[in-house]
């Protein structure tokens, strides 16, 4: 028996892979099961063109056999096996792919592909093994072979009398180290969990002896351990089944089995694409917002499979951030994978799949909005804020994709409406889409600034999320209709006669307004007579890009304490309080200062802004009362 050395570059690659490339040691089991499945595939494909080979699927399986006493884990398959030359070529040279070489020789049928690279996947076993022994016998060969290596000093190959065709890989599991528990790879329950996690949809049965507690007799309460052979994997993934065969309960069961959430899915999509890139997918829109959704702990992403083998538990690249609430799986035969199968290359296939998924989700949500409004509004209540963040983020790059999915509460309809519905109802003389911001619908309803817009018969959208106004500023317009806040300084809704009267009043009372501005100093940019107020005495409006509501949001963030809106104090010259101001201007300048400060603080309270000096305000109120 001759001991052969690995090629120098292969030995170096082995050391790197064992210590660096794989982030989780449990990956080795997925790799070896995938290779066993590939070996069975090879017989199947040969049987398609070779009449001398019969393929009875019931005869083909993968068997997992742990032995705690000997510290071995055996992975056996009934696949095509390997010759001596193939052993040297596939296991002696790391990253030499028997599967890829075979793939070039045989035309794939039934849409199936052989995935992965045998050499690299096989050598992942040395992450948990101090020695690996392979017993194999190739199809149509009478003689078998034994391959053995400790992963360091090369390998040996010698003849071996193996009775049946196929391969057995015996892993001699390492002893536990200080921070490494290798016993888990000999534990029955742990192995079952790993098989279900990574290889549940391998299309051949994965068998293992399982010990369970069962009654000793029919009428006996005593439980005894009974060991039976079980098939661990489900084999046929739900996404490969015909949609017509499935019901809502099947999709709900799969959602719960995969632990996508503790709720029920609000809606699902079953996608099958066969074009430039082939993939199948089941996507879910959850019913409830995950408790950690807006925290750093939340991980977006879809489970990614290649031919039924789990590659990544959370592939974030398949979802845009604004659809990060979507859960589910994607299975593709066309993925380009790198050496470890853990890190997906940013290749053309991945981008095509992601683009297709984004479009499918968008169309599904639009269909819900059109055909099942109640369900869509339930979705929007949970995830609408995320769509608004999507409009605002990336400098509005995705606003056109998301604008028709947005809903806002309507002043006239008293319910959520879309921008399209709003525009379709607009009177001919209405030029803008009006909105008002506040903490709640009730508070917005009472805002003085809404009076004039409502008197015109115009609908107002109520913004209560902190992101609303930021998103709308990024959106700018919808269907060529510009958005305008009811607190904007230039509503320009007066008729010509009212404008002339306002100019006349402004000129007549310019000294009073100037004095009030001087009293308030840099607290406001200006003090002016209001054309928007009807019954209320005072309000604040804003000029410039930063609104009053935006100021409140921004000042809650670090390093934004000095940001403020350009506030304008507007006085209703038709209100009795204005006449009191005019009279005070003539007789008592101290009263003008008193009234001005009270009115300014009133306006702050209406806007939900903090009072700078509450004690001074209460003292001013007492002065008015005596």
Image: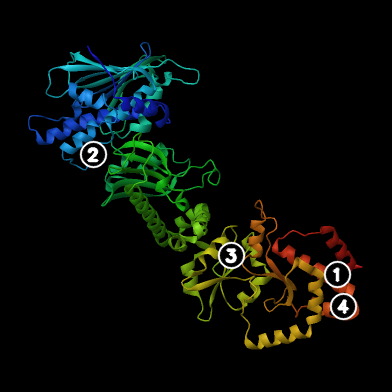
Q: Compared to 116, does 420 lie above or below?
A: below
**In front here: 44 or 23?**
23
Which residue carries the number 3 mark? 462
Q: Which badge, 2 or 4, comes first in the chain's sequence?
A: 2
Residue 211 x/y as whole percent: 36, 18
Q: Which badge, 2 or 1, comes first in the chain's sequence?
A: 2
- Left or right: where does residue 513 sit relative to residue 287? right
Mark 2 and mark 4: Cα distance apart in space: 89 Å
Name, please, the residue furthest toward the right: 626
Which residue carries the number 4 mark? 584
Mark 2 and mark 3: Cα distance apart in space: 54 Å
Mark 3 and mark 1: Cα distance apart in space: 34 Å
Q: Which badge, 3 or 1, comes first in the chain's sequence?
A: 3
Residue 300 x/y as whole percent: 46, 44
Q: Quadrant of residue 295?
A: top right
- Left or right: where does residue 265 sit relative to residue 492? left
Q: Compared to 490, does 442 lie above or below?
A: above
Q: Which badge, 4 or 1, comes first in the chain's sequence?
A: 4
Please give the name of the residue rendered at 34% of the width and 53% of the height, measured from the top-left corner: 356
User: Is label 3 in a helix, a strand or a loop?
Assistant: strand
Please give the name of the residue rendered at 18% of the width and 15% of the height, measured from the top-left corner: 162
Q: Quadrant of residue 448?
A: bottom right
Q: Compared to 215, does 279 lie above or below?
A: below
């Amino acid at each position: 028996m001759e001991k052969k050395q690995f090629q120098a570059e292969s030995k170096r690659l082995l050391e790197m892979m064992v210590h660096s490339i794989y982030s989780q040691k449990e990956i080795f089991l997925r790799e070896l099961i995938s290779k066993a499945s590939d070996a069975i595939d090879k017989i199947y494909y040969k049987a398609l063109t070779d009449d001398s080979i019969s393929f009875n699927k019931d005869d083909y399986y993968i068997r997992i056999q742990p032995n705690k006493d000997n510290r071995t884990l055996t992975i056996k398959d009934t696949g095509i096996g390997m010759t001596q030359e193939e052993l040297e070529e596939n296991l002696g040279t790391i990253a030499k792919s028997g599967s890829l070489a075979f793939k070039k020789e045989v035309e794939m049928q039934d849409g199936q592909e052989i995935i992965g690279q045998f050499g690299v996947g096989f050598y992942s076993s040395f992450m948990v093994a101090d020695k690996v022994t392979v017993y194999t016998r190739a199809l149509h060969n009478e003689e078998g072979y034994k391959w053995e290596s400790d992963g360091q000093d090369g390998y040996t190959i010698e003849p071996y009398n193996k009775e049946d065709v196929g391969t057995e890989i015996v892993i001699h599991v390492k002893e536990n180290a200080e921070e490494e528990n290798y016993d888990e790879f000999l534990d029955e329950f742990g192995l079952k969990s790993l098989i279900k996690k990574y290889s549940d949809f391998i299309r051949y049965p994965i068998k293992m002896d399982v010990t369970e507690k069962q009654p000793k007799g029919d009428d006996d309460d005593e439980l005894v351990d009974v060991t039976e052979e079980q098939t661990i994997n489900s084999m046929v993934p739900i996404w490969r089944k015909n949609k017509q065969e499935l019901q809502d309960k099947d999709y709900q069961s799969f959602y719960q089995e995969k632990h996508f959430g503790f709720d029920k899915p609000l809606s699902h999509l079953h996608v099958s694409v066969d074009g430039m890139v082939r993939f199948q997918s089941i996507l879910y829109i959850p019913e409830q917002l995950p408790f950690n959704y807006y925290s750093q702990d939340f991980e977006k992403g879809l489970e990614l499979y290649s031919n039924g083998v789990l590659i990544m538990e959370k592939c974030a690249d398949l979802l845009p951030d604004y659809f990060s609430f979507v859960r589910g799986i994607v299975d593709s035969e066309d993925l380009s994978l790198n050496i470890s199968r853990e890190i997906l290359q940013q290749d053309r296939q991945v981008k095509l799949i992601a683009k297709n998924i984004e479009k499918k989700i968008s169309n599904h949500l639009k269909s819900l909005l059109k055909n099942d409004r109640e369900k869509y509004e339930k979705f929007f209540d949970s995830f609408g804020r995320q769509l608004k963040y999507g409009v605002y983020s990336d400098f509005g790059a995705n606003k056109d994709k998301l604008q028709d999915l947005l809903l806002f509460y309507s002043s006239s309809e008293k319910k959520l409406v879309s921008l399209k519905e709003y525009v379709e109802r607009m009177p001919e003389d209405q030029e803008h889409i009006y909105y008002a911001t506040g903490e709640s619908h009730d508070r917005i309803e009472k805002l003085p600034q809404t009076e004039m817009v409502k008197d015109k018969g115009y609908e107002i959208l109520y913004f209560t999320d902190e992101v609303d106004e930021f998103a709308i500023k990024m959106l700018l317009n919808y269907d060529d209709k510009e958005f305008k806040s009811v607190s904007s300084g230039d509503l320009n809704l007066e008729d010509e006669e009212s404008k002339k009267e306002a100019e006349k009043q402004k000129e007549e009372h310019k000294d009073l307004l100037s004095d009030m501005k001087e009293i308030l100093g840099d607290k406001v940019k200006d003090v002016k007579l209001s054309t928007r107020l009807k019954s209320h005495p005072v309000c604040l409006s804003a000029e410039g890009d930063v609104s009053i509501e935006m100021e409140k949001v921004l000042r809650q963030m670090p390093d934004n304490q000095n940001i403020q809106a350009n506030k304008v104090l507007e006085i209703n010259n038709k209100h009795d309080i204005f006449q009191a101001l005019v009279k005070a201007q003539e007789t008592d300048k101290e009263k003008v200062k008193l009234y001005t400060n009270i009115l300014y603080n009133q306006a702050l309270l209406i806007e939900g802004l903090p009072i700078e000096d509450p004690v001074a305000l209460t003292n001013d109120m007492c002065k008015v009362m005596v």
